[in-house]
Structures are given as C-alpha cells and as structure tokens.
Amino acid sequence: MFLTEVRRHNDEELHAWAISLLTDLKNAGTTFTAHYIGYGQWTFGDENEFKDNTITVKNLFAGVGTTIIFCFDFTIEDNRKDIIQAMEENKDAKLLWIGAEKDPFDHPRIDCVFWPADMLLQNKQYKNFDDIKKEPSEQRHWISTSLGIRPHRIYVASLLKGLGFDKTGDLRIKTVSGNGYAPDNTTLPLYVDDKFKLTQEINDISNESTTGYQELIQRKWWGSSLFLYSSYEALGKNQNNNAANFDKNLRHLYIDKTLEVVNETRHGYDPIFVTEKFINAVVGLNLIVMNGPAGTVRLLEDLGWNSCRHVINHDYDDIKNPIVRCEKAIRLNSRLFNDPDYCNKTWQDNFETLKNNSEWARDHLYNKILKACEEQVKTRINTRF
C-alpha cells in the first residue's frame, strides 16, 4: 500500500487507520501513490540514521495521480524547500500532506491535513492511568522539564532563572549535550544568534534572561535531579516509551506540582507541532503555559482543550517574534510562577476543568482528530484532486 514505509514503534493503531483510509480511497477509484514517514526530519536524503528506508524528494512524485504522504514527525526547513522545488519542477504533481505539523506548506498544489500523531500515539496506554492524587507544594509548586536541549528551552530557562522564579519551582534543564544546541556561547545574544538562528530579535532579549543565562552556563544541569536519556532508553523501545515514561518517571514529579511550562519540540517561526509532552502535562492535571510555535494554544483549544484562559494569560500565543513570545509567556503569568499560594488555589478552583481535560486527552481526542482528519482527506480528494 505504501511505496515507502518507515514505521514508528508502537504505531499499530495509527498505521492501521492510515491503511484503512487509503483502502477506502482506492475502493472509491482514487489513483495515488503513498508514503508513510515515521521520522520526518530523518527520512529524506541518503546520509542519515534511516538510510535504508529513506526517499529522495524527487522520487516522491514517481507515480501517477496524487501523492499522499502520512508524516508522523516534524520536518526541517530545507526538506520543505526541496519539496516545494520538486512541485515546481513537476507541474502535474499534486500532494496531499497528512502531517503532524499544522500547515507546513503554502503551495497551490499541496493540500495539508493536520494529523498530530505524537499526541495520539499510545492513546490506549494513557487511558490506563488514573488521575494523579495531588499534594501541592507550598515551596516549589511548578515544573519545567527538558530532556533534550533546544534553543527556546534554554531561553525560557534563562528567563525563569533570571527572574528568580526557580526559587518556587523545579527548573530542570541540561546545559551540555551532543545535539549541537548546548549553550557554549559566552552570552545569551551570541547563543540566540548562533543556535536559535535569530539575529534581528536579539534586541528583544531582556536583562533578566541575560543574567539567568550567565548563571545557567556555570553548571552542566539545573534542577532537583538529572534525568538521563539512558534512563529513558532503559524503558525499552517495545515498552511504549512515552506512556511508560509518564508512568515511571513523570507521575511522581507531578504529585506536588500545579503548574508546568511545556517545552515543546519546535518553536521559532516553525509550523505548530505538538507532542506527548503536552499530553503528559494534561494527564498530569497541571495548569499549562506553552513554550512552542505561535498559535499552539489556539489550535489545541480548537481541538477541545480548555486552556483556562480565565486564569492563565495566553496572549503570548499570538506573538510571532519568538523571543518576545518566550518573554511574554512567563511574564504575563508571573504571579502563577512566584506565588505558590495563589497558584495552588487557582489550581484547586479549576480542578474539575483539569480533570475534564485529562478525560479529553485520554478518551475523546483520538477519535475526534482521526474522524475529522478522515473527513478532510476524503473531501479534499473529491474536490481538489
């Protein structure tokens, strides 16, 4: 059914849904070729971890009719540019991109359907988790976790540190890593320019963030403990990593926390990409401040999540400038971060909403998204292609 198939671990249900959808299209007489891309940023090209399963962009449109791609992951800017270029070189090409990013392409012959696969992966496993019994801390009531270093995570950690909010929360951040984003630059502006690839936005860096960065780079990691990637790998690729990670490593961290900064995978000017990091916070019954691409909160609200806008200021979500967005996400909600009594009472007052959110994530989100996705695909195939 798939011309190229790069599977994710434990993706059986989502893979079966994709096959079922393609079968319906085939039975309806639709002519297409299809690819299943489990690792978006790695699958294209010849030199990478999955080189035996890679595809070149030019070969995407080798078949006749419409090309359908199920992409489980985020893509990188160079890949998106290459796909656009390939479309321009093949004037008859039509692409239906069913992806985990929101609208990654802007092209007249590419239709995008949002399929946030990382949010849906292992949905059945997450259903097994009972609501966490909380005992809110009066000293350190919020948490920010980051297993892998990314520039927006370093920036928000610097801001939280510079504002002194780490005194009331568990700020977990590594400052050494092999992924190329380690803060080895001497100043925050240099780091933002070099690693965040932002130059004009440097003028928006605050004094507090600059000060916090200088403190962060004095140590290899900050936080109450260091969670190593080896500990995550120890869960086993066949043990449903995300769900097992929540059950074995995150659940106990959330017991006394009422607020979380969700440090998503993507940021900057990237398309919206939401993962299990958000689902963990929702199932963990936390109030949430999102550290991700612009529009992330709005998209999640459209999917049915109650973001508690009446008590959390999410105006940062509309800000395009990545540095200003980071700054506003924390500053607009400063009292929630630095006043444990206020935050814990706010959490208690909205506990039923948070329980409903957890139920939404575990019981309603999966079917709602896939049903909507299926309807969009069939409609666009019939009207556009």
Image: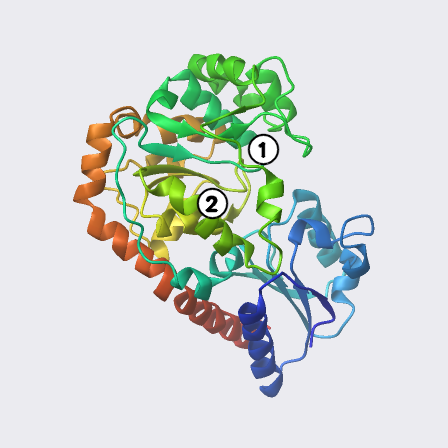
In this rendering, is residue 26 above or below 131? below
Say which residue label 2 marks.
249
Residue 5, compared with residue 218, is above or below; it is: below
Dividing the image into 4 quarters, which one contains the C terminus? bottom right
Mark 2, residues whose alpha carbon is within 10 Å: few (<14), some, or many (≥20)? some
Q: Secondary structure at mark 2?
A: helix
Q: Of 152 and 261, which appears nearest the observer?
A: 261
Q: Position of residue 52 (x, y in %)?
A: 81, 59
Identify the residue under disc 1: 149
Task: Tell me where residue 238 sits by quadrant.
Answer: bottom right
Residue 117 higher or lower than 201, as above or below: below
Counting every numbered tag in the picture gives 2
Label 1 secondary element: loop
Residue 347 visible in the current orientation: yes
The reply, left or right, for residue 364 in relation to residue 89 is: left
Residue type at mark 2? Answer: Asn
Write the residue at 38% across / 17% down. Answer: 163
- In this rendering, does residue 275 appear at all? no
Residue 189: percent from the left, percent from the top?
57, 17
Q: Position of residue 243 (x, y in %)?
A: 48, 55
Question: Viewer-proximal residue, 173 or 304?
Answer: 173
* Quadrant into which the N terminus falls: bottom right
Q: Residue at x 57, y 46 (%)?
A: 232
Amino acid on which the number 1 mark rests in the picture: Ile
